[in-house]
Amino acid sequence: MTLTDDTGMSRDETFTLTINESGPTLVLISPENRQSIAPGGVVILEEASFDADNDLVVREWRRWSDGISLPEVISTSSIDELTNLMPGEYHLSLYIEDSQGNWLEEHVNITIQSSLPSFDRDSLVLSETTFVAGELSQLNISIRLDDADGTTKDVRANLTHNIQQWEINLTDDDGDGVWEGILEWRPEETGSPSLKLVARDGEGQSANIDIFTSTLNVEESEDDQRILFFALGAAGLFGGFGILAFMAMRRRRALSDIDLIASWDAFRAPEKTAEVEQRPLEENIMDGTEEVQSDLDGLL
């Protein structure tokens, strides 16, 4: 450096200027340490790290797992999202490094909550609810299952009819939450079969389960109904003939009783009885006969 005054005199000075390298500054915004995320929720990855000399060369979001020495790099962006994470504990970190090899890393632990499977009762759709005994039938089943964490993989339909049982697995091939299946069955007799839908999330005693039941109806075939109606009609016809035969037999027996009564000596007038005395007796005989006949007509 040279300095000059008004008279033209000058002086030179020399000095040394040293510029030190700057290290990176790590700024992690999200997620926070020990943050709890709702089932099926999105994990936001966001950071605002910088370096004074603007020479950041590495930015990595890392996922650490037990038993693995090296982490998995899940993103290199300043802002990103993690979706479809299964329920559980996660160990994440943000790593930055500049061109001079200076680096920093910050670790966080987060939790993804789990959800319970739940059938939408109003969404059940059955192709039919009434079936015919003895016929091979198909039952199309469709129902929506709500499970925010998407961990339910076992959904079954069980149909019980007396000692008969059928079971199929329902599937959600397109991932829209609607589980479907086709059950083939042949009920042997009439009744009210029970359809039970079971969603199982997990294994063994710790599994979360939701159950929904519905009742179907099995009727007789039309041929069986015709046979029943014919049998009832035949029984009614034979019953009518039996009643008529019984009434005719009762009438013949009643007439026989009248003839027997009329033949008794107590109701027969003496031969030498005066006409004045005979008339009341004959009238009494006729009155008794008419009374028996009247009673018999009332029975018939």
Image (tube, grey):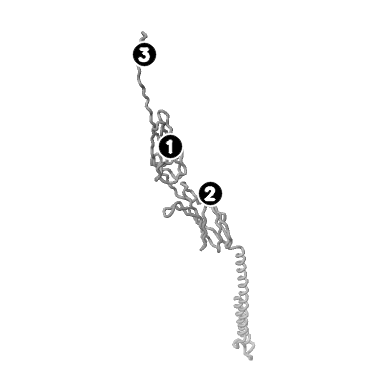
Camera-nearest residue between 245 and 134: 134
- Percent x, y of residue 125: 54, 52
Disc with the residue nearer the chain's start (1 vs 2) = 1
Q: Is residue 110 visible?
A: no
Camera-nearest residue between 111 and 214: 111
What residue is shown with label 1? 60
What residue is shown with label 3? 3
Q: Is residue 205 above or below residue 112?
A: below
Instruction: Give the Cα distance between marks 2 and 3.
Output: 84 Å
Helix, strand or loop for disc 2: loop
- Percent x, y of residue 180: 53, 52
Q: Amino acid at mark 3?
A: Leu
Q: Amino acid at mark 1?
A: Glu
Which residue appears at 43% of the width and 32% of the height? 57
Q: Is residue 99 above or below residue 280?
A: above
Dot 2 alpha-carbon crowd within 10 angstroms: few under 14, some 14 to 19, many 20 or more: few
